[in-house]
Image (spheres, rainbow, N blue to C red):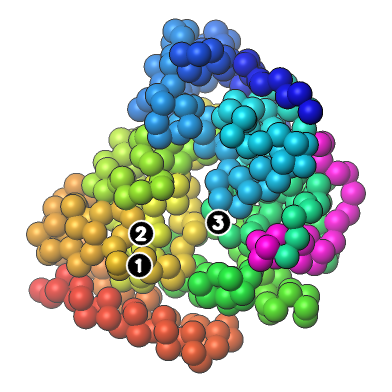
């Protein structure tokens, strides 16, 4: 098949009331990818990426790295890991090698299926429209598991349409209706709500317990006073190997009183700060400062500090730059996105992807005190109260995990690491 590359795309933004407006245009030549804001958008709205885009009508060239030659705001629309695997399968089935595909081609393929409010036109000819029908959640989950485990190379179109989110785990962006746990759709229908459903595999670090372990961590984070997404556990089919799959309610969608679906602009720390998520490239110092500046609130810095402490004591070390995000409302106001991808995820060297004022692990008391000061706490005692509250919530792990029917073996594995982490960092609790 002869494939013609995409050289120009219109960038649109879906608003929280369900209406859409053109934000600008992307164009590509041998020098790279350029973006230009639409004049009408400049008059009515705010900057999509305040740290890296000029909010004017100039032509703006994207940096070569770290976003595949795209600006960070638009790179956030592309999947990585799982979603990229599905996309590449479609290209290969069309006899197009993925290396021939540019980032602009991928944006055209994603079209209106990205997380967040941005969508792109024209849509790629290889991208099939969403299927307006009820789908079997069990069938999709088993298909995703088979692909992830390497048992099949065929891809269901519905799974491709539901697969534009990031991360390595098999998952799907789906619409679910209350009381109809077996059926789902890739298309919004009145009365349904948008979820990200995470499937499991024996190939994952925690095997088929990944979903329930993440549910335990979400419960602990909520107890620690951290804003987490709404979620629920769905019963998995017996032949999946899992007892339950985790469904996270999407926080980038809104429903109007009339029943229309709207969107909020979602921007990751990776895209906002040009931080490469594939390697340690971020410090909590950066996140705390960015949160306070972007959200124009000292409380945002304190919320980020609380999340940082949770990750430190809970062994959530996969805290890379794509696992932090911000939401922009139609009026330009930014908020921290809820705390997501929060689970037990130790790294090979027990180091965090995001550093603590230069420390990859076991940060010094001085480093955390410095971060507390940057997070707008009036004194160390105030910050310590937050640390104590977070540690108390994490100390409930064994009890909470038992309530979620995590196996004794996995409870011991995670519990031992949490205990070790407490011993390593308990100096932060000393008066």
Q: Position of residue 171 (x, y in %)?
A: 65, 57
Residue shown at the point (40%, 31%) measured from the top left: 65
Q: Which residue is mark 2?
A: 307
Residue 168 has which mark?
A: 3
N-term-proximal mark, 3 vs 2: 3
Q: CA distance from mark 2 to mark 1?
A: 22 Å
SS under mark 2: helix
The picture quadrant where one finds residue 234 is bottom right
Q: Is residue 129 magenta?
A: yes
Q: Is residue 370 magenta?
A: no
N-term-proximal mark, 1 vs 3: 3
- Marks 3, 2: nearer the viewer: 3
Q: CA distance from mark 1 to mark 3?
A: 17 Å
Q: Which residue is mark 1?
A: 348
Residue 21 visible? The answer is no
Could you tell me which quadrant the C terminus lies in? bottom left
Q: Residues within 10 Å of mark 3 (few under 14, many from 20)?
A: some
Nearer to me, 19 or 74: 74
Q: Position of residue 425 (x, y in %)?
A: 20, 73
Residue that sits furthest to the right in the current view? 133
Q: Position of residue 329 (x, y in %)?
A: 52, 34
Nearer to me, 39 or 312: 312
SS under mark 3: loop
Q: Residues within 10 Å of mark 2 (few under 14, many from 20)?
A: many
**Lateral position of residue 171 relative to residue 288, left or right:** right
Could you tell me which quadrant the N terminus lies in? top right
Residue bounds of the magenta highlight:
127-150
Residue shown at the point (49%, 90%) measured from the top left: 409
Nearer to me, 39 or 270: 270
Q: Position of residue 307 (x, y in %)?
A: 35, 59
């Amino acid at each position: 098949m002869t494939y013609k590359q995409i050289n120009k795309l219109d960038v649109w933004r879906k608003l929280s009331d369900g209406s859409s407006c053109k934000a600008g245009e992307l164009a590509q030549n041998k020098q790279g990818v350029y973006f230009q804001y639409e004049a009408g958008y400049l008059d009515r709205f705010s900057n999509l990426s305040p740290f890296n885009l000029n909010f004017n009508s100039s032509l703006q060239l994207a940096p070569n790295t770290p976003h595949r030659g795209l600006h960070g705001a638009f790179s956030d629309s592309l999947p990585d890991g799982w979603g990229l695997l599905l996309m590449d399968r479609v290209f290969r089935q069309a006899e197009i090698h993925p290396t021939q595909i540019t980032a602009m081609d991928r944006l055209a393929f994603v079209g209106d299926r990205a997380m967040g409010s941005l969508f792109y036109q024209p849509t790629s000819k290889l991208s099939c429209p969403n299927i307006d029908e009820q789908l079997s959640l069990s069938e999709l989950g088993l298909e995703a598991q088979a692909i992830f485990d390497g048992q099949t190379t065929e891809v269901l179109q519905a799974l491709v349409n539901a697969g534009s989110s990031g991360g390595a785990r098999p998952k799907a962006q789906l619409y679910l209706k209350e009381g109809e746990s077996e059926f789902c759709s890739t298309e919004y229908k009145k009365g349904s709500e948008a979820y990200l459903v995470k499937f499991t595999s024996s190939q994952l670090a925690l095997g088929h317990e990944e979903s329930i372990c993440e549910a335990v961590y979400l419960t602990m984070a909520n107890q620690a006073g951290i804003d987490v997404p709404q979620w629920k556990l769905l019963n998995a089919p017996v032949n999946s190997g899992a007892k339950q799959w985790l469904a996270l309610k999407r926080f980038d969608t809104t429903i109007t009183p009339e029943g229309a679906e709207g969107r909020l602009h979602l921007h990751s720390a990776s895209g906002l700060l040009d931080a490469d998520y594939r390697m340690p490239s971020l410090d909590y110092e950066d996140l705390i400062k960015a949160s306070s500046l972007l959200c124009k609130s000292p409380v945002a810095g304190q919320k980020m500090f609380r999340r940082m402490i949770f990750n430190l004591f809970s062994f959530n070390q996969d805290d890379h730059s794509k696992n932090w995000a911000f939401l922009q409302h139609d009026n330009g106001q930014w908020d921290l996105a809820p705390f997501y991808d929060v689970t037990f995820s130790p790294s090979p060297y027990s180091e965090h992807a995001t550093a603590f004022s230069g420390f990859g692990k076991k940060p010094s008391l001085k480093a955390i005190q410095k971060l507390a000061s940057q997070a707008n706490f009036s004194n160390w005692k105030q910050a310590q109260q937050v640390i104590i509250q977070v540690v108390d919530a994490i100390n409930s792990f064994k009890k909470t995990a038992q309530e979620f029917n995590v196996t004794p073996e996995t409870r011991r594995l995670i519990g031992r690491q949490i205990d070790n982490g407490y011993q390593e960092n308990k100096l932060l609790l000393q008066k």
